[in-house]
Amino acid sequence: MEAKTDLKDANMADAWADALASHARFDGGNDLEANASRLAFADPEFMMRRDTRGIRFQLEMLKPDLEQQAQNILQTVVVFGSARTPSPEQAQAQMAAALAAGDAQSLAKAKRAEQQATYYQAARQFAELVAVHSAALPENERLVICTGGGPGVMEAANRGAFEAGAPTIGLNISLPMEQKSNPYLTPSLNFQFHYFALRKMHFLMRAKALVAFPGGFGTLDELFEVLTLIQTQKVKPLPVLLFGSAYWKKLINFEFLVEEGAIAPEDLKLFRFVDTPEAAWLHIKDFYQL
């Protein structure tokens, strides 16, 4: 018989457990314990109470914002995409293992990985184009690549900027499966979040363009929030590029939404399909006359 869920169980992830896990990961695993004699703002257990959630919202808003201000980062290009997208090196290793094993299922997965790895390489090349353009600009005019800070497409974009010698931002999120920061982030721009809502707000605060590569629920969540904010004029229009037209057109029938009256025909102009790093960068340059 399946275990029943208690109606009174809290739905929200526990901030204290999240803080303990984060402390263990970044501070060598030393004990993090409550202490009534601490100043209130220095008492982690007090800061993690449900009653202080509003304060934590403010802190997650302020910390990344103030640090980016200090580094004179005013404009970003945000890259969304699946954390599961393999690098070409990973795809090659998977294919070699599949060939050695010789079974059809492994070979089919390896071929799919090779196809997905083309998105990794495209994200890497796109970020390099942005970084090379910005290298010659004054610090306050550069476009800085910003991702969710994890593996897959996020890693690829951070990697492209890193290899071009540019700073690169990661807005990572604490998850039960422990999404690790990729190694291509600028250490002082590698931010951790507990709240998805605050993280998504930071994606948009400095964004001058967004490029969505193939992804799953997380990518769709981020993409549709951006489109909704532009549609409702909560943010100014900006380039929203869906990379990989075959993927996006198969995944979402945007024309059907128009036919059903769920969106207006002009809402289809809020985004554009692109299939090469060069086309994505060219559209951004044309939009801002760079």
Image: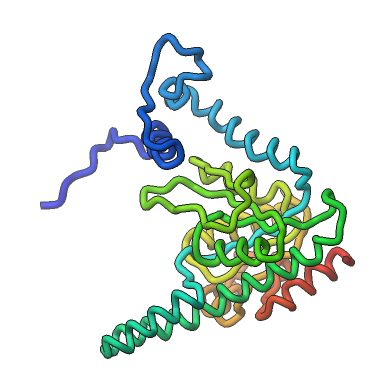
Foreground residue among 7 and 289: 289
The answer to whether 78 is drawn above or below residue 27 in the figure is: below
Whether residue 12 is visible, yes or no, is: no
Count of labels in the image:
0
Residue located at (74% from left, 42% from top): 71
Residue located at (59% from left, 52% from top): 170
Q: Position of residue 168 (x, y in %)?
A: 66, 55
Q: How is the image coloured?
A: rainbow
Is residue 131 shown left or right of residue 113?
A: right
Foreground residue among 23 and 46: 23
Q: Residue furthest top?
A: 37
Location of residue 25 by image quarter: top left
Q: Position of residue 175 (x, y in %)?
A: 41, 48
Q: Residue furthest left?
A: 1
The quarter of the image holding the C terminus is: bottom right
Whether residue 169 is visible, yes or no, is: yes
Q: Position of residue 52 (x, y in %)?
A: 49, 23
Residue located at (61% from left, 79% from top): 245
Q: Position of residue 12 (x, y in %)?
A: 40, 38
Is residue 61 shown left or right of residue 87?
A: right
The answer to whether 201 is drawn above or below residue 226 in the figure is: above
The answer to whether 253 is drawn above or below residue 60 in the figure is: below
Residue located at (55% from left, 66% from top): 153
Is residue 96 shown left or right of residue 159?
A: left
The answer to whether 143 is drawn above or below residue 10 in the figure is: below
Location of residue 201 by image quarter: top right
